[in-house]
Image: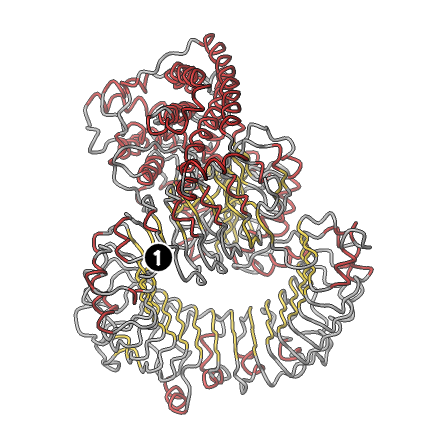
């Protein structure tokens, strides 16, 4: 980590702690230790100017690197001590605020846990100890003869005012690789090979652009038209055959494969690749093990003639081992192309093309030896240097003449690092925490930087803005990369919640990651396994943890970062220095112990996705907390009243907290707040809408209970039109709002034109405001959600918005047509719309007022997904939907009028790209699936069919017409009394079968099996008469049986289900036993049994499988629970299972042991 910046932060803290306002609290303490504090200040001031020289020399001198690591640890510990003193001040102030009188209440509080005399003694001891260590560091320092850095050759952060970067790089901007691309496309498409599945490789040094070249080839139209499917898998240094096979299956089919059974995987791969001319890109392969490659190769040989595997690797031996028949040995860029790349990057408006600059620049490019990554990084570096002396200093740096200190760190990259400002160095190095090939959410990363104090605060500049400028600097210097396509090559995702949806994300090149790891040393630990964890240095301060591995952190008290933290994590209460804590979304935590308050240094706390119902009032004692993430806490009912005292809080995330109905009074006291995704207006609680004027909010903002706003003047106090940093706005009314008041309030809440997303909920007005009808005002919108606006009879002209991608209209009974006027010069209507959701439109009759007008422009030219729910009067479909992939219809298109109309015009025959169809209570539509002509276009495209409550529907007839189905769900199908084995027997493509609420289904089967020969997933829900299951095929991987009150046994024998990975049984009160032969379930990893009280024991065959399970959950089965508990017959068998939950709900309290 950048030691200079850590020292700088410690010095800043010393200045803060000796300031006059703070001394009134700390004078009793400083009276005994002020000499030690002054000595620490002198030491740090003595070392700081020399650190830059040391950081530059560490690449060539291991002794210098060791000295820097020693200094780093001492600097961190000094920072912790000073932060404890600063936190002590904040705690005194917070307690005084919270409890009132400083003299009486605070004394009581500090008597037990924060006795001032005891604190002085502890602080004094710590300062003396750290001064002794730093004294030793200084003594050691003298032998290196470090020099004070010459900062005259560095600009004063010229990058602060650079424009924001963007992620789109067209193919035309990739320089110097046209011939290489043509050569490899020729190999893939036209060259003849003896093997029907041949390997072609791209071999070259790291940073030569192998992945970029492979991406160009992968996206080439000729390649995409020649191969189907095209599959991209990032391999990196983990050549795990089972994992790679699973990734290939997932990329090709969208199915997740979280098991390791090779028998199942080979069947899946044969199905996905069999007799298809595929292209598989294996990117960044390091494997030199013949056996591993042969194991994978044997799984890939079933492709059709002409299939190709394109490998990128740094190692020519790896290429030979993989049997590459032809290779492209990628060379460095030509002198001309190298200069073109450097010139494009280095010479901007701030750097002129002076002859001397051009001369020096060409010499620098020559030193990069044609390596694109190095040229780009050096070009980015030089862009910040506007003086000739600065250019000359880079050219003359001794790093060019010294052999590389390691095999991983290139001199060009090292120069780029050492030329970073200290605060940027620190942020860059922290990224080593994330595994290679990770995708990282930008906002979360910046908030982590801020939580650790990496971002210097400047007067007049917001710290979040500073953080994003540093991120842009790292992007601009090519040390981080923006990511737009997360579907290829992503092995890990790290974000504020579990979704990539509409998040700005980035990643780091492997060579750059090696550089960051070299700088950080043992400071970060990523995904340690149980045996590795015991060997981790006690100096490690940042952890990303592995799910499924038990961690005891009691011996790592210096930890500053820990996530994701789950129920397999102990010792959390010992981590008093934590700055970043993120709970695992599957942690099943439903309560936060009051002892959370003792994690005083915490700056970032994420409880996102947990079952937390409320937070303890003691949370206000987290005096340093800046970010509190409660997104998707669906059970959260209230915020603590004490939250209004948390004046360090900057980001409060409350998305998807439906049970949160009221905010604490006085929330406007949080003057530092930048993010507030939910604000509930309440006159009674003192949370008027005008309170928003106290905050400079950005990102998402949701305003609820707007009926509490008295009039337009009060609404204008929110000053929405000037909030250009709000990109998503949600406005919601409650009961009791008058029409006139609502219309005036909505008009007064006109947002800034930069808005991207707009939602209106329960707006009672009869017409929308002028600004909603103004195309210019909303021209940047990409999403609109109009819900419960029942009084409006016309929609605004949304069809004219050029960038609108998603539209939801819900519960608007007054609307008859989506489009009221098709006149004008538009080439198409809704030109960019991809997702359309129409719900509860009781009077919707059609799409356009002038629906039959022949000259009307095309409607929905890009639509991919459409939901039509509860639109009983709608009788038409848009004439052409060539791009529609997914269609859901519920209780719509019903009655005689519809039946007559579509007998002539057809309904499905124009949907040639449809992949998924769901019909609920649409009897007439479901019957159309029995018509061979109507379904002809669907026979090859439709993959998923879900039918709900269509009693007259004939499954057997429809299945004969739909020959490509992979997913079939049937709900409340009355004709189904016995297992549909006969009608499903020929459905060879069917992989997933869901049967729900089929009340007459008993389970009897004429043939004794369930039908589909390659079924992988069987789920049976709410089938009251079901007695037993038929024999399932050996391909079955997942079996779910829910709420089947009559079932007594699953089936006579399950031993043949060698692919079964997951078995879940729930609420089957008559289930008395499991079948014999379960020792044959060699792939079983997950076993869940809930509310099956008659189940007393496991069959003998299951005993062998219990120790090999990854997860076991048993609840609502008293007798079985006793057997699996300590002292029970099965306890020794289940004790080795890392994720096991016996007895009631596995939810627990976080930090339950009090400190």
Which residue position holds label 1?
679
Q: Position of residue 237 (x, y in %)?
A: 56, 38
Q: Which residue: 34% across, 16% down?
A: 149
Q: Is residue 465 above or below residue 906?
A: above
Density class for disc 1 (Cα within 10 Å; few <14, some 14-19, many ≥20) is: many
Looking at the rendered image, the quarter that the C terminus falls into is top right
Image height check: is 150 above or below 936? above
Q: Say which quadrant the N terminus sits in.
A: top left
Furthest toward the left, the residue is 824
In this rendering, the answer to whether 867 lies above or below 478 is below
What residue occupies the far front of the structure in this picture? 104
Q: Nearer the viewer, residue 452 or 537?
A: 452
From the viewer's side, name the closer residue of 627 and 179.
Answer: 627
Q: Is residue 212 visible?
A: no
- Return the x and y of residue 40 as percentages of the image width and height: 43, 17
Measuring 32% from the left and 20% from the top, which residue is drawn there? Answer: 394
Residue 1128, can we see it? yes
Q: Could you tell me residue 104's position as x and y percent?
A: 45, 38
Q: How is the image coloured?
A: secondary structure
Task: Name which quarter of the figure residue 176 lies in.
Answer: top left
Q: Does residue 213 appear to the left or right of 199 in the view shown?
A: left
| Labels in figure, total | 1
> In terms of depth relative to the viewer, which is nearer, 262 or 464?
464
Horizontal placement of 1006 versus 204: left or right?
right
Quick one: 774 or 297, which is closer to the camera? Answer: 774
Asked which secondary structure carries label 1, the reply is strand
Residue visible at 23% across and 66% down in the picture: 800
Percent of width and height locating residue 258 = 60, 53
* Residue 933 versus residue 1128 in the image, above or below: below
Asked if residue 514 lies left or right of residue 815, the reply is right
């Amino acid at each position: 980590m950048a030691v200079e910046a850590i020292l700088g932060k410690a010095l800043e803290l010393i200045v803060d702690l000796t300031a006059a306002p703070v001394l009134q609290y700390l004078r009793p303490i400083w009276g005994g230790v002020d000499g030690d504090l002054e000595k620490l200040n002198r030491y740090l001031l003595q070392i700081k100017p020399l650190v830059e020289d040391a950081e530059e020399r560490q690449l060539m001198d291991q002794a210098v690197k060791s000295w820097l690591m020693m200094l780093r640890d001492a600097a961190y510990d000094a920072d912790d001590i000073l932060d404890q003193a600063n936190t002590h001040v904040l705690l005194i102030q917070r307690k005084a605020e919270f409890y009132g009188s400083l003299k009486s209440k605070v004394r009581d509080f500090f008597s037990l846990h924060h006795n001032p005399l005891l604190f002085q003694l502890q602080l004094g001891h710590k300062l003396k100890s750290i001064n002794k260590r730093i004294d030793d560091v200084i003594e050691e320092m003298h032998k290196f003869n470090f020099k004070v850095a010459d900062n005259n050759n560095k600009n004063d952060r010229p990058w602060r005012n650079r424009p924001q970067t963007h992620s789109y790089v067209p193919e035309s901007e990739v320089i110097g690789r046209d011939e290489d691309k043509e050569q490899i496309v020729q190999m893939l498409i036209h060259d003849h090979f003896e093997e029907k599945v041949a390997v072609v490789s791209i071999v070259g040094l790291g940073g030569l652009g192998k992945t970029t070249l492979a991406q160009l080839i992968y996206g080439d139209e000729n390649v995409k038209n020649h191969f189907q499917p095209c599959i991209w898998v990032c391999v990196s240094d983990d050549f795990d055959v089972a994992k790679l096979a699973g990734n290939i299956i997932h990329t090709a089919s969208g199915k997740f494969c979280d098991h390791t059974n090779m028998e199942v995987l080979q069947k899946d791969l044969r199905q996905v690749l069999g007799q298809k001319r595929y292209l598989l890109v294996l990117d960044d392969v390091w494997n030199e093990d013949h056996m591993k490659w042969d194991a994978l190769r044997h799984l890939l040989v079933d492709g059709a003639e002409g299939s190709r595997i394109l490998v990128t690797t740094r190692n020519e031996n790896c290429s030979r081992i993989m049997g590459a028949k032809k290779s492209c040995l990628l060379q460095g860029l030509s002198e001309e192309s190298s200069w073109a790349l450097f010139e494009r990057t280095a010479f901007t408006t701030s750097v002129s093309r002076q002859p001397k600059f051009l001369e020096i620049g060409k010499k620098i490019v020559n030193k990069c030896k044609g390596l694109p990554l190095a040229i780009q990084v050096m070009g980015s570096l030089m862009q910040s240097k506007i003086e000739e002396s600065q250019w000359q200093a880079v050219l003359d740096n001794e790093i060019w003449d010294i052999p590389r200190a390691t095999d991983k760190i290139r001199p060009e990259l090292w120069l780029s690092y050492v030329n970073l400002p200290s605060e940027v160095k620190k942020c860059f190095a922290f990224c080593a925490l994330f595994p290679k090939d990770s995708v990282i959410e930008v906002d979360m990363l910046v908030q982590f930087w801020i939580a650790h104090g990496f971002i210097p605060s400047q007067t007049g500049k917001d710290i979040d803005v500073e953080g994003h400028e540093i991120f842009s600097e790292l992007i601009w210097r090519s040390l981080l990369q923006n990511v737009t396509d997360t579907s290829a090559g992503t092995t890990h995702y790290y974000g504020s919640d579990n979704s990539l949806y509409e998040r700005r994300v980035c990643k780091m090149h492997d060579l750059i990651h090696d550089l960051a790891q070299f700088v950080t040393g043992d400071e970060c630990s990523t995904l340690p396994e149980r045996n590795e964890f015991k060997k981790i240095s006690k100096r490690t301060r940042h952890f990303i943890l592995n799910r499924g591995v038990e961690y005891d952190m009691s011996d790592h008290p210096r930890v500053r970062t820990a996530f994701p933290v789950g129920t397999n994590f102990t010792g959390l209460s010992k981590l008093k220095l934590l700055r970043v804590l993120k709970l695992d979304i599957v942690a099943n935590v439903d309560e936060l112990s009051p002892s959370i308050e003792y994690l005083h240094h915490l700056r970032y706390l994420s409880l996102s996705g947990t079952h937390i119902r409320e937070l303890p009032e003691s949370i206000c004692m987290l005096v340093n907390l800046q970010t509190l993430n409660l997104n998707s806490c669906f059970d959260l009912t209230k915020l603590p009243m004490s939250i209004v005292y948390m004046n360090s809080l900057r980001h409060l995330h409350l998305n998807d907290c439906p049970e949160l109905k009221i905010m604490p009074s006085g929330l406007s006291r949080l003057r530092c707040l930048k993010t507030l995704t939910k604000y509930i207006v309440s006159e009674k609680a003192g949370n008027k809408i005008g309170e928003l004027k106290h905050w400079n909010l950005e990102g998402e903002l949701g305003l609820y209970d707007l009926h509490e706003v008295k009039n337009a003047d009060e609404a204008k106090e929110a000053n929405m039109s000037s909030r250009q940093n709000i990109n998503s706005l949600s406005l919601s009314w409650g009961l009791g709002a008058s029409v006139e008041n609502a219309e005036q309030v909505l008009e007064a809440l006109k947002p800034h034109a930069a808005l991207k997303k707009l939602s209106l909920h329960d707006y009672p007005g009869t017409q929308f405001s002028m600004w909603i009808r103004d195309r210019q005002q909303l021209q940047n919108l990409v999403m609109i959600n109009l819900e419960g606006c029942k009084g409006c009879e016309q929609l605004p002209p949304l069809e004219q918005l050029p960038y609108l991608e998603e539209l939801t209209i819900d519960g608007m009974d007054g609307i008859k047509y989506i489009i009221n006027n098709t006149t004008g010069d538009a080439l198409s209507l809704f030109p960019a719309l991809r997702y359309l959701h129409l719900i509860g439109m009781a009077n919707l009759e059609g799409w356009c007022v002038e629906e039959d007008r022949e000259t009307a422009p095309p409607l929905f030219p890009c639509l991919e997904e459409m939901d039509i729910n509860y639109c009983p009067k709608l009788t038409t479909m848009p004439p052409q939907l060539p791009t529609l992939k997914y269609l859901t219809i519920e209780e719509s298109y019903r009655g005689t009028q519809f039946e007559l109309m579509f007998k002539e015009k057809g309904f499905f025959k124009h949907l040639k790209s449809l992949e998924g169809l769901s019909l609920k209570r649409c009897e007439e539509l479901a019957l159309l699936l029995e018509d061979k002509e109507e379904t002809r276009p669907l026979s090859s495209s439709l993959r998923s069919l879900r039918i709900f409550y269509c009693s007259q529907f004939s499954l057997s007839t429809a299945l004969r017409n739909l020959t490509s189905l992979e997913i079939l769900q049937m709900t409340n199908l009355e004709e189904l009394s016995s297992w549909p084995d006969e009608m499903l027997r020929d459905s060879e493509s069917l992989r997933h079968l869901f049967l729900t609420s089929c009340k007459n289904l008993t389970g009897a089967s004429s043939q004794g099996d369930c039908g589909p020969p390659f079924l992988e997933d069987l789920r049976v829900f709410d089938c009251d008469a079901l007695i037993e299951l038929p024999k399932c095929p050996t391909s079955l991987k997942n079996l779910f049986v829910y709420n089947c009150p009559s079932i007594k046994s699953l089936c006579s024998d399950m031993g043949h289900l060698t692919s079964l990975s997951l078995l879940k049984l729930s609420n089957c009160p008559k289930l008395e036993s499991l079948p014999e032969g379960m020792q044959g379930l060699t792939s079983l990893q997950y076993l869940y049994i809930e509310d099956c009280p008659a189940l007393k024991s496991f069959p003998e065959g299951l005993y062998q499988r219990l120790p090999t399970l990854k997860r076991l959950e048993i609840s609502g089965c008293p007798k079985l629970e006793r057997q699996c508990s300590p002292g029970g017959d099965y306890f020794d068998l289940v004790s080795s299972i890392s994720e096991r939950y016996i007895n009631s709900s596995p939810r627990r309290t976080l930090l339950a042991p009090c400190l």
